[in-house]
Amino acid sequence: MRLGLDFDPSDGDRASSRLTRDDPAQRSTSTMTNDAEHKSRDSDSAVAELGGDFTSGTATANGTTIHYVRGGRGPALVLLHGFPQDWYEWRRLMPRLAESFTVIAIDLRGVGGSAAPSDGYAAADLAEDVYQLLGALGVDRAHIVGHDTGGWVAYAFSRLHPRSTSTLLIMETPIPGIDPFQHLDIDVPLWHGEFHMIPDLPEALVADRQAIYFRHFFNVGTNDNGVITDADVEHYANAYRDPDHLRSAFEVYRALPANITLNAESTATVDVPLLLVGGERVFGPVMPALAENLRAHYGWTDVRVEILKNGRHYLPEERPDDVAELIERHAANR
């Protein structure tokens, strides 16, 4: 199935991105207080249920406020959520991963506990948010994992800040601007990409119906619809609760032209180990072609593919042990 995004890549200028390539001097110098982290943990039952030493905090990064959940000990591991989710999509992996890593699960700009400014939703901007957040947390390098639209941010992060990327894992998404993005041979409807790019209309139709709308995607993207419970859906609906946060969900898609331009023009050699992970019943079948294209035309020297048999889209929630094992194994490359 074709994604159907018909535009001139030069349209990327309409979704401007404030690019800052690998420059530690550009990082945020903001700091967080322990009191703020402890208060956040006490008030957030979802974080408390993780157990261990997980805490919730915020930092000023790239001109906005970014929320994160952090715990564990070891090399830094950054988890970037997709649509229509927030940090909570990683909850079933985080305790296990915290045994080997300092886990940092982030609410991207405009989602959940992060602020929702009017602009800055191109992948490069979101990647800069992550980069500056890591600087505020004293992290120089990290393993980066992105699922769905979070994979777009993870890819931009590694392109713009390769020296800060230990390994990269992109799960269940094609990469905008790189074939087969425009010609996806999969048996899953992708109508929502163009719908989300329409100005104002998605917000008008989805407002106060977030749970209904989001449940549709979770049902299509899982084998067992009960794996994401009604309570989970309500959590995600709350992450996009107000008009500004709901608008942000769609602004990520409206910034696709800028993402396409960035990715299509980025062909320098990258030695970061990259693992592409797909569910067999959704994006898995296109991953081998994507890997070959990245090797042949986009400078990636170490690209591997893992396809989870019978897997669908929301793998961190439906296949958490399999995903955690892939993350652990891939991170061992560096």
Image (cartoon, rainbow, N blue to C red):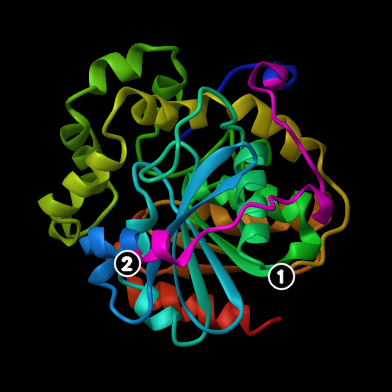
> Is 220 drawn above or below residue 224 in the view shown?
above
Q: Amino acid at mark 2?
A: Arg
* Residue 326 visible somewhere in the drawing: yes
34 inside magenta stretch: yes
Quadrant where the image shows the N terminus: top left
* Structural crowding at the residue carrying mark 2, measured as other residues with C-alpha within 10 Å and reported as few (<14), some (14–19) or many (≥20): some
State the image quarter where residue 34 is shown. Answer: bottom left
Q: Is residue 318 left or right of residue 169?
A: left
In the image, 101 versus 220, the foreground residue is: 101
Answer whether residue 295 is magenta in the image.
no
| Residue 303 visible, this angle | no
| Residue that appears at 32% across and 67% down | 91
Residue at x 82% of width, y 60% of height: 270
Mark 1 / mark 2, whichever is N-terminal: 2
Which amino acid type corresponds to the residue marked 1 in the rendered image? Pro
Give the camera-side residue of 30 and 230. 30
Which image quarter holds the C terminus?
Answer: bottom right
Q: Give the residues in magenta.
A: 12-38
Asked whether, in this view, residue 303 is left or right of residue 5, the answer is: right
Instruction: Decide: few, some or many residues near mark 1? Use Cα within 10 Å; few <14, some 14-19, many ≥20.
Output: many
Compute the Cα span from label 1 to label 2.
25 Å
Nearest to the eye among marks 1 and 2: give it. Answer: 2
Q: Which residue is mark 2?
A: 91
Is residue 125 rendered to the left or right of residue 217? Answer: right
Question: In the image, is 70 to the left or to the right of 38?
Answer: right
Residue found farthest to the right: 268
Residue position marked by numbered label 1 in the rendering: 273
Q: Secondary structure at mark 1?
A: loop
Q: Is residue 319 above or below residue 114?
A: below
- Measured as percent of width and height from the top left, residue 226 is found at 13, 58
**Considering only vertical position in the picture, is 27 above or below 238?**
below
Identity of the residue drawn at 25% across and 23% down: 206
